[in-house]
Amino acid sequence: MKLLSEVISKIKPKEGSFDKEIKEVVSKINSELKKNKIKAETVVGGSFAKDTHLVGDHDCDIFVRFDYKKYKETDLSELLEKALKQFKAERVHGSRDYFQFKKSLNYEIVPVLKINKASEAVNVTDASPLHVAWSKKHKMSDEIRLAKAFCKAYKIYGAESYIKGFSGHVLDILTIYYGSFIKLLKASQKWKDKTVIDIQKYHDDALFELNTAKTQSPLIVVDPIQKDRNAAAALSYEAVDVFKKKASEFLKKPSAKFFEKHVMKKEDLKDALIIDVVPQEGKNDIVATKVLKVIEELERQLKKNDFVIKSWGWEFAAETFIWFKLKNEKLSAETIVEGPPVKIEKHAEMFKKAYKSVFEKKGRLYAKTKRKYVNSRDLIKDVLNSEYVKERVERARLE
């Protein structure tokens, strides 16, 4: 398809982009490892290693692979820290601590054990270089680029807890399994709940053989390197629904617009309640998850107080904001509360004591009562001033 060739030419970085800097970083780390007599090697990982990175991608994963026999029982993060002093890297806590620093690219330096098969892994990250090698051998980088750009356009790329979308590894597997980006889109239209993709054919029945905790996602993507792992375990039903919907739209009417990021602008949000947010400092995953918790609390309180949400969304970028479109921004001063059936005397008496204006209709009690919130703006302001919200964001203000 000519359109896809044109899209690839726009999303694919020029050959050699950042190569010089990456090689320099790798060389310096290797030099420091040697100087400190640490038996390890440095290799590029992630999308830069797989050649699936996109124009505008500035995150580069680098693995420092430590000798398995010598360091299996060692704290690899402590060892690596010695070799990264010149980079003034920040140590980040994880299942095994890793390091970050910034040059032209944002570098994430991850210590792993050098293993030949996933069963030797001591930590989940140890198998990551094996994932890279598996993906590279299939030579489908441009098809994978299309899948990544497509998912990024609709904010369903990434397994982070505030996205719960398609990770790079999952898109690698799906694109390779189906054979191309277009075939992936077509196949998605037939996905049902718990569709299993087992590219290596490890299981006769993955749903039965895998631990049930690993099969709660809408797709079960058996990791080709780790047969007991569902690579799509973090994937949400919402992300799959968006993918299928947009895939259907693209197949009916292909356009380059499907690969362009859709950023909501305030000026486009007519009749919406907009909340400006200043997130806390910290890692994107943690900070954004806290913003999402604020949204969930706002949604819960609006529904609880009878405000009907037509749609909502948020932008988490240079400018972070939340928006809600309501069916009813203002409500009547009074509401009707449903009580128990009259024949359940004990509960009926309790209801009559709790409310003044009680009446009966078709054998059930009801009561008229004043609403706490008539105006949705008053409710939102109170939620934003609550300790719950103040603990999760630096500031939040209703425009």
Image (cartoon, rainbow, N blue to C red):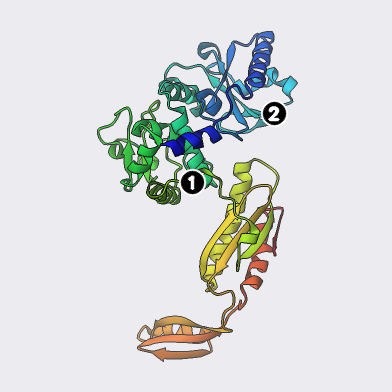
> Where is residue 158 drawn, in percent x and y?
52, 40
* 284 over 101 or under it: above or below: below
Residue at 52% across, 74% down:
306
Q: Is residue 43 above or below residue 5?
A: above
Q: Amino acid at mark 2?
A: Ser
Residue 66 visible in image: yes
Tell me which residue sits at (41%, 90%) in the image. Answer: 360
Residue 24's tag is none
Q: Position of residue 86 (x, y in %)?
A: 74, 20
Which residue is situated farthest in the front direction here?
A: 2
Disc number at residue 104? 2
Circle nearer the viewer, 1 or 2? 1
Q: Is residue 111 above or below residue 367?
A: above
Closer to the camera, 375 or 55?
55
Q: Residues within 10 Å of mark 2 (few under 14, many from 20)?
A: few
Badge number at residue 258:
1
Q: Which corner quadrant holds the C terminus?
A: bottom right
Q: Residue at x 47, y 83 (%)?
A: 351
Q: Secondary structure at mark 1?
A: helix
The 10 Å Cα crowd at callout 1, few under 14, some 14 to 19, many 20 or more, is some
Question: Which residue shows up at 53% across the image and 42% down it?
Answer: 160
What is the quadrant of the N terminus in the image? top left
Query: Residue 216's x, y, as percent?
Result: 38, 45
Residue 215 can be seen in this image: no
Where residue 78 appears, x then y in whole percent? 65, 22
What secondary structure is marked by label 2? loop
Q: CA distance from mark 1 to mark 2?
A: 28 Å
> Horizontally, is 160 left or right of 199 in the view?
right
* Res. 395 image quadrant: bottom right
